[in-house]
Amino acid sequence: MEFTSAQARSRFDAVVAVAASTVVGLDFDGTLAPIVDDPEAARIHADASDVLADVSQVVRAIAIVTGRPARQAVDMGALDELGRAMAEHGTSLSVFGQYGNERWSAGERRVVSPRPPRGLASFERELPAVLRSAGAADAFVEEKGLAVGIHTRRMPDPAGAFERLLEPLRQLAERHGLTIEPGRHVIEVRSGDTTKGDAVRVLVEEHQAGGFVFAGDDLGDVEAFEALHELRRDGMPTLAVCSATEQAEVARLADLVVPGPDGVMELLRELAVAARASQRTH
Ligand SMILES: O=P(O)(O)OC[C@H]1O[C@H](O[C@H]2O[C@H](CO)[C@@H](O)[C@H](O)[C@H]2O)[C@H](O)[C@@H](O)[C@@H]1O
């Protein structure tokens, strides 16, 4: 693959040099799974199982860090099967769902999840009226157990509906002790207890990571990228990868931008090849 800057190349090389102790964190929608109109129709990239199984042989751990409920990511990604394959050579696979609120690991094979946040049920009771008064009664409401996602992608003017909803949903969420997580034609309403940055820090601690690669495409990934920047300031080799997106803030924080899930697959393949070459010569 072509690196667009010498700095990106050198950060990739630095991670390759410590691949055996590196954790790879991957967002799901837009990064491992191509964006589609219907959230329920999303599926992991066709090459992902093979590519992740290959990368897992040269790194310490792989984690999917997503806004999705953990169980949904496991099912959409056929991660049960992948986790069993990875366990054969001792690499851990885990899922941090709902921005780190839920956990699944291939070893335990069950989701650990808190109770829904206080205020979610009353928020949902008031939601239809707020959607109607913002002219967005047709928005798709995704029920996520611990959160709801209000999607505008399938509306006639997705960006306009998103803008009209942002402030009223923020106010309604705040009244119920909740927070909003704006994303790609979606506004999620959830508890503000955890971020993907917290998931990165937990993974570093649990795996005693010596390097970290994170790939993401949406605003919910910003805290993970910021956590990588902190780790880098403390001396750890890290690589922040943006899977092409209209979210400029994500690209700004990344070391390199790759062309969507296809590009993420290519980068991971290259990481596996380079790490094997490096491990042979040392
Ligand atoms: O953290 P992620 O893995 O990126 O999940 C974030 C949210 O992604 C999903 O919505 C996005 O993908 C949909 C399917 O491609 C798309 O239709 C939608 O417009 C995107 O915003 C998902 O529905 C949410 O539950 C996730 O939290």
Image: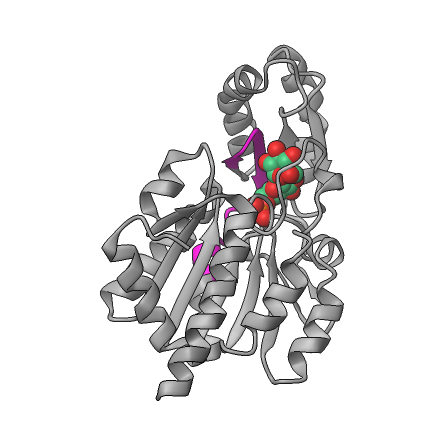
Residue closest to the eye, 55 or 194: 55
Q: Position of residue 53 (x, y in %)?
A: 63, 71
Give the residue at x 73% y 57%.
71
Q: Position of residue 107 (x, y in %)?
A: 69, 78
Q: Height in image: 2 above or below 268?
A: above
Residue closest to the eye, 46 or 220: 46
Residue closest to the eye, 42 or 268: 268
Q: Is residue 81 left or right of residue 252?
A: right
In the image, which residues are magenta? Answer: 181-199
Q: Quadrant of the C terminus?
A: bottom left
Residue 194 among those drawn in magenta: yes
Residue 42 among those drawn in magenta: no
Residue closest to the eye, 248 or 264: 264
Q: How is the image coloured?
A: one colour
Q: Position of residue 24 (x, y in %)?
A: 49, 66
Q: Height in image: 124 above or below 207?
A: above
Give the residue at x 24% y 55%.
6
* Res 148 visible: no
* Res 178 visible: yes
Q: Quadrant of the N terminus?
A: bottom left
Q: Position of residue 75 (x, y in %)?
A: 76, 57
